[in-house]
Amino acid sequence: MYGEFELIERWLAPTTGEPGKASGVSLGVGDDACLMRPAPAHELVVSVDTSVEGQHFPEDAPPQALGHRALAVSLSDLAAMGAQPRWCLMALTLPEVEEQWVAKFAQGFHAVCDEADMTLVGGDVTRGQRAVSVTVMGEVPTGEALRRDGARAGDVLAVTGALGGGAGGLAAWYEGQRDLESPLLARYLLPQARWQAGLALRGLASAAIDVSDGLLADLGHLLKASGVGARLDAEALPLAEGLVEALGTEAAREAALTGGDDYELVVALPSAAFDRARLALAELGLAFVAIGQVTASPGIQGVNASSLPGWQHFHGGTS
């Protein structure tokens, strides 16, 4: 029977190199705290997300997918800031120790770590309702972070990838689908954080945010921070593969506007920079689609006013 420290040592320690020897880490797993060294002339970018069973993921979701998802959704915040991923911390809460479950969870988590060249530098394990909290740390050259407050009237609004897949995948799961090869299920349980796109957009974008709670909700945060509004072209929204076939055109568009769990980037940028950004993202194999324009007048125009703004905690869902 594993205890807390044995569990950490066996499954949750870094998978590459010796603890404390990874890039930028003076002291990693095994002490009261970790010591990191950001690159000179860089700012540290830090974000934390918590995923709770039954709230953010189904109780019977595959543990390997949960490990992937727990880190990817946090990594998406670094992507929105244009930050280079560096390190992460993970706090795991479990009702009991199930070695096979933890092994598969760790496999999914470390796979995303390795893909993003991140190092797990510490964390905690405790007993309770299953939940995962992940803190991610990255760095960006001083003054070059993508922020929410830089959008200006006349900027193009564009989105990476496609929208609505998170909501479509969740609906498919509750309908009984379990094949993770399904594009919609993969979009929900195995989201791809667009951190490489965030790096490519530095110096081109005026503002950016990731879509975690739905396009309208998250775009609304960006517009409020920038003191501007937007006009959207609902027909231009790029819809996830299989979404229209699963939900129908109208419901698919609603999922793209309000569904959440897409983890794409919504970006404001000058029209003169759009083609350069589109080509840069095309080199990453990623679509970059214009969906509207920033306006001086507040509010979001061009979409059905009855559309709900997206997920909000403590409001029982959308509101």
Image (cartoon, rainbow, N blue to C red):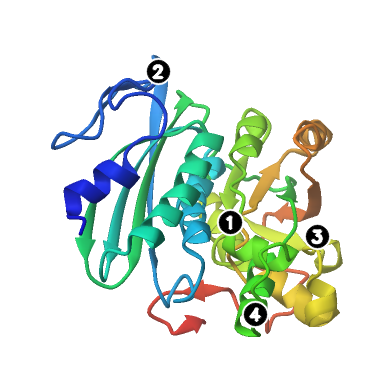
Separation of residues labelled 2 and 3 (CA atoms): 37 Å
Choose between 54 and 292: the one closer to the eye.
54
For the residue pair 219 and 22, the one nearer the viewer reads as 22
Q: Residue at x 21, y 47 (%)?
A: 6
Q: Earlier in the sequence, mark 4 or mark 1?
A: 4
Q: For the residue marked with disc 3, what is the amino acid?
A: Pro
Name the N-terminal-most of marks 2 and 4: 2
Amino acid beneath label 2 = Ala
Q: Report the disc number at residue 238.
A: 3
Q: Report, in whole angstroms, how far the alpha carbon at label 2 lies from the one at label 4.
A: 43 Å
Q: Residues within 10 Å of mark 4 (few under 14, many from 20)?
A: some
> For mark 2, what is the residue?
39
In the image, residue 174 lies at what x, y percent? 60, 83
| Number of other residues with Cα within 10 Å of mark 1, as a class: few under 14, some 14 to 19, many 20 or more | many
Q: Please give the residue where the numbered disc 4 appears in the rendered image.
A: 171
Query: Where, by quadrant of the figure, is residue 256 drawn?
Result: bottom right
Query: Which badge, 1 or 3, comes first in the chain's sequence?
Result: 1
**Which image quarter holds the N terminus?**
bottom left
| Camera-nearest label, 2 or 4 | 4
Q: Which residue corresponds to mark 1?
A: 223
Compared to residue 73, the image places residue 136 above or below, namely above
Q: CA distance from mark 4 to mark 1?
A: 29 Å
**Which x, y percent locates residue 278?**
80, 38
Helix, strand or loop at label 4? It is helix
